Image: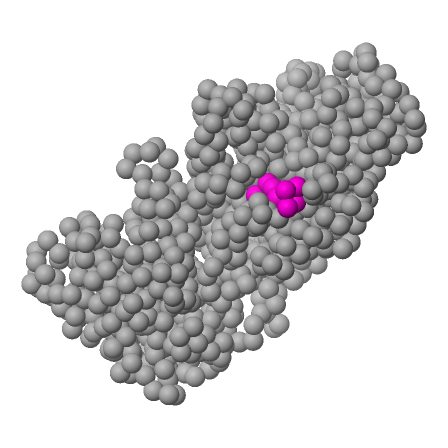
Amino acid sequence: MTEHTKDYFDLLENRLVIFDGAMGTSISSMRLSADDFGGEQLVGCNDHLNLSCPDAPRAVHASFLDAGVDVIETNTFRANRLTLAEFGIGEKCEAINLAGAQIAREIADAFSTSEHPRFVAGTMGPTGKLLSLDVDHQNRVTFDAISDVYRQQAGALIAGGVDLLLIETAQDLLEVKAAIHGILTAFQESGRKLPIQAQVTLDTNGFMLTGTDIAAVITALDGIAIDILGINCSTGPEHMETPIQVLSERSRLPVSCLPNAGLPSNSNGEAVYPLSPEDFAQWMTHFVDEYGVSIVGGCCGTRPEHLRALVERIGERRTREPRIKAITPSLSSAFHSFPLNQEPRPFIIGERLNTQGSRLFKRLMLTDDFASAMEIAKEQSYGGAHALDICTALTEKGDEAVRMEKLVRLTAQSVDLPLVIDSTEPHVMERALRAAPGKCLLNSINLESGEEKAKEVLSLARRFNAAVIALTIDDAGMARTAERKLAIARSIFNLAVEEYGLAPSDLVFDPLTFTLASGSAEIADSAVQTLEAIWQLKNEFPVTYTVLGVSNISFGLKGASRRVLTSVFLNHALQAGLDMAILNPADILPYREIKQHEKNLAEDLIFNRQQDALERYIACFEDKKEPVNNSGKKGEILPLEERIAGHILERHKNGLEADLDEFVLRDSREAENALEALNTILLPAMKRVGEQFGKGELILPFVLQSAEVMRAATDHLEGYLEKSGKTSMGTIVLATVYGDVHDIGKNLVKTILSNNGWKVLDLGKQVPAEVIANQAAENNADAVGLSALLVSTSQQMPLVVKQLHQRGLNIPVLIGGAAVNEALAKRTAKIDENTSYDGGVYYCEDAFEAMAVLERKKAQFIS
């Protein structure tokens, strides 16, 4: 570590750090000639000025240092060889970066004093290649090629004497990873290690160009080899508040924020940025005070006067004390973050993209039918999986790594779920990690052949910020007793956490289970031992996670007998503390729906309570062909209302439309009957599903299946429902809050409100607070409805209310969802200690309560 590097970390630890403003804006104002740029073909290539007209960047640096900033950024934003090649000067990459660093170093040293040292950030912008999305193999650049581009640029900046390296205006998460790997290679080659500051750029809706939100950015990058994480460019600070709040609450790293001077407008062919120096300084100070941001500065449109105003407003103030952050262990897709702590458990890993377990998928991989494989991936996503296990190993043909890379690229782009990379070969895992933008889970490591291969995988996990599944296997084979499983887990924990520095929350133990269908007395107690091991693992390693390939327990059985045994075992594993399960949701039954005598026989087998438990269990299912459920005795015809509700509760569409037609057409009041079916049968049935989910009696896939039936029912009833002739009751904006991908409850509220005279503007899911507030204002909404399933995402609701308050709106806000209650409504209504939101915040347990609230307030809503 150089003295400058040490000083920079000391500065960051002790007080707020202020970066400079816009190099490009300042250069544009100089009205330089073609000769200054080095010729007509280089006009606009600001980076080349480092060679052709060094006084220009030197003057810009001096203007910002004179304003009092702590850090200046080299004039090298587009100085990678790919971007420079567009001007025909790719071969000048190293010279331009070296000169840019030396110019900044010289001027920074000239302004430095013992009381106010100045620092240089070596700036590296995007290459213009979207590594995450380019899957057609036309003009494609590889992860390694992009990594080498950044290695070259970083090496020259390091040689020129920069104090830190800045990856900025990043538009593609996978390119950020490639850049970091290139920088680490440059560190090795130069023998110098500098701080790395990574900054992504987000649009006004809070997404990177490739669709990644800030939570996914944090999950993917927070555990990788960077020191500061932040956002810059694209928008003004007003659009950055939500992502800055998320960064401040969830990232372990210091947070940086370098916005534009507002959103630009075009005036006579030039970009005009509206934010005044005073407003810019006020916003930055707000981010420091409210969210504890450690590094502030400016991007496009920010001139020396903007930074001078910021320096004067902040002065020599120190940063706030570090916040207590709610770190949420997660995996991420290319787009969103998925917490490992699911409410209720388990975190479901779909198992159907596995050549070792799915005959269909194996056939697809033998014929290279990746399009059909994507359909399987999407089906698992629709079915409630939280991640997808991917295994492409085939004994019939080689090239596992090639298939793995292609499948990962396609799946990452097509399906919004994290990926579990399932292979016994570290080089295959590495190919997958170089293709996956998000944070993956590696499946798996063990100690079967000692520690060598496990160390290879753990090294990959550290380099790429992946989590790891650890199997309880050593050189004596698969552990069968809880005691041995725990002993192996201790050895792996020490290796992964103590030696390789993996976060405990990135370690997932698989205590393994054996099939109970073999009849072997030697493993008859294996399920009991697995359940005991889960409990012991959670007790000794509470921050780690547990996972099981649940269906292994019933391998060798068929049909209903397999589904029942797997489902009963899953229930007991969850009670023991299981966090994650590798399974096909279609092969699982809700525990409460299994007949009691079948549960008893399954539990006799699982807990080894009877010597002939397997024979008795198999005999029970020998002649059973119909599905297992509790809807009534075989052949019994239930009352019509019960049949309609049963479609929702038992998740089947067969006969749904016929039953609805029978109910609606019983007399001439078709519209009234349709509304009655919706309000008195379907919605109460869906409410029961929600209650069962909240109690942990149903896992998410079953809820989604019921919701699909509900959607089919409401679509069918719409043909009967007559529009009320009344004046519209008003307009309500509905949204699932930012960070939450669940919209079942919101969709039900939409259905009932729209059928009762309300104009519903449905913004969908994952909606940032400022977007909700803007839409409410622009559409003159009479109310806002917010939904959240998770405790973590429900914390977005107060931010929405604050945004409404800031816009002077006083419309009621209705909130609901599994994580929402009356106490949250009261907290959400408090703007600060002395101010409450005028419109009121109302907790609504269901669509009916939402209707009741709106009815009470309707006098304020009618247009």
Highlighted magenta segment, given as a residue range? 441-450
Q: Is residue 593 left or right of residue 493?
A: right
415 or 477, which is in the foreground?
Answer: 477
Task: Place residue 505 in its image quadrant.
Answer: bottom right
829 or 278, which is in the foreground?
Answer: 278
Rendered residue at 56%/60% (across/down): 250
Q: Quadrant of the N terminus?
A: bottom left
301 or 38, which is in the foreground?
Answer: 38
Specify the color scheme: one colour
Residue 438 in the image, given as x and y percentages of width and height: 49, 46
Residue 774 magenta-highlighted: no
Rendered residue at 49%/53% (across/down): 463
838 or 199, which is in the foreground?
Answer: 199
Residue 447 in the image, given as x and y percentages of width and height: 66, 45
Residue 259 in the image, given as x and y percentages of width and height: 37, 63
Q: Is residue 369 above or below residue 263?
A: above
Rendered residue at 39%/61% (across/down): 188
Residue 71 in the image, given as x and y percentages of width and height: 35, 74
Residue 446 magenta-highlighted: yes
